[in-house]
Image (cartoon, rainbow, N blue to C red):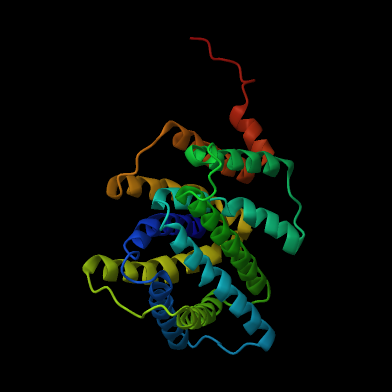
Amino acid sequence: MRSTVLYVLTVLIWGSTWLAIEYQLGVVAPEVSLVYRFSIAALLMWAYCLIKQLPMQFSIKNHFFFMTLACCNFGFNYLILYWAQNYLSSAMTSIAFSTLLIMNIINTRIFFGRPIAPRMFIGAILGLAGIVGLFWQDVKTLDFASEAIIGLGLSLAGTFVASLGNMTSVRNSRNNIGIMQGNAWGMLYGSVFLFIFTLISGSEFSLDTRLPYIASLLYLSIFGTVIAFACYFVLLKDIGPEKASYSVVLFPVVAVTLSMMFEGFVWQTSTMIGFVLVLTGNIVVLTPVHRLRRLFASDKPLKQG
């Protein structure tokens, strides 16, 4: 029951954050918006941990992994994805991000030695074909300088960085580090690293005081960062990165629906085929063979009327 609730919250929140990000772009530099976002989230997380009197002292080694978590899950992965959404709609970015599922499985094999089932390769091929379908209009011209291809490359790069963060979270949980404490340190380090990056890049610390920006910033900070990450990392701890990644299959559906409502996202034939292939590939990856056989079994006798 707990896992079901966590899935629903994760899917609905993260499925809607892609649209919220659109309201962060334009006036304020992405890195500055992320400094605001993770600073607010860090303050909330630290306040919670201090009120609950959770232990916050850890070894230098664990702080290294908190910094890794910060860079990969609470920092530069989002910066890259914000850059991607300068080129793509929230729908397309969210679908590309769903390849996190395949990346998580591959990285779980690399870092934790978990074997890769044969169906994973089928799912990966379907997912790759789906990505090609989504961006077919640009792929067929081989124009790697086109905005869509640049956006796709940034989306996949940000997704890969996020997958490394997922692996770090799994490592932290296996070393008995509490989800809330790990997130609090990670968000603190993430905001510091982004602040330093902003200073180096010379971006101006401005603030868009219009309601859409402020409302989306608070939503992304509180719901998209504090609540959603807590839910997702608990899922990682309870059921593992592969099963937790079921949420990645579902939230693009939420993101696409919202994009159609608020961004005027229009389906093309190749886009629809690509979307179906990506989702199918993810489902194949996550569904054990015996369940697939049961799903498509046709050996039951038909009832006679």
Identify which residue is drawn at 42% across, 73% down. 34
Give coordinates of residue 60: x percent, y percent. 67, 88
Q: Nearer the viewer, residue 208 or 148?
A: 148
Q: Residue at x 63, y 72 (%)?
A: 173
Q: Residue at x 35, y 64 (%)?
A: 25
Q: Quadrant of residue 39?
A: bottom left
Placement of 191 over or under 145, stated as above or below: below
Relative vertical location of residue 182 with respect to residue 92 in this rendering, above or below: below
The vertical placement of 71 against 25, above or below, is: below
Q: Quadrant of residue 280?
A: top right
Residue that sits furthest to the left in the current view: 210
Q: Position of residue 106 (x, y in %)?
A: 69, 54
Asked whether residue 177 appears in the rendered view, the answer is no
- Report the residue at 50% width, 83% height from top: 196
- Whether residue 51 appears in this view of the structure is yes
The answer to whether residue 286 is left or right of residue 228 is right
Farthest top residue?
305
Image location of residue 119, percent across then percent down: 69, 40
Q: How many marks?
A: 0
192 displayed left or right of 59: left
Give x and y (percent) for residue 236. Answer: 59, 63
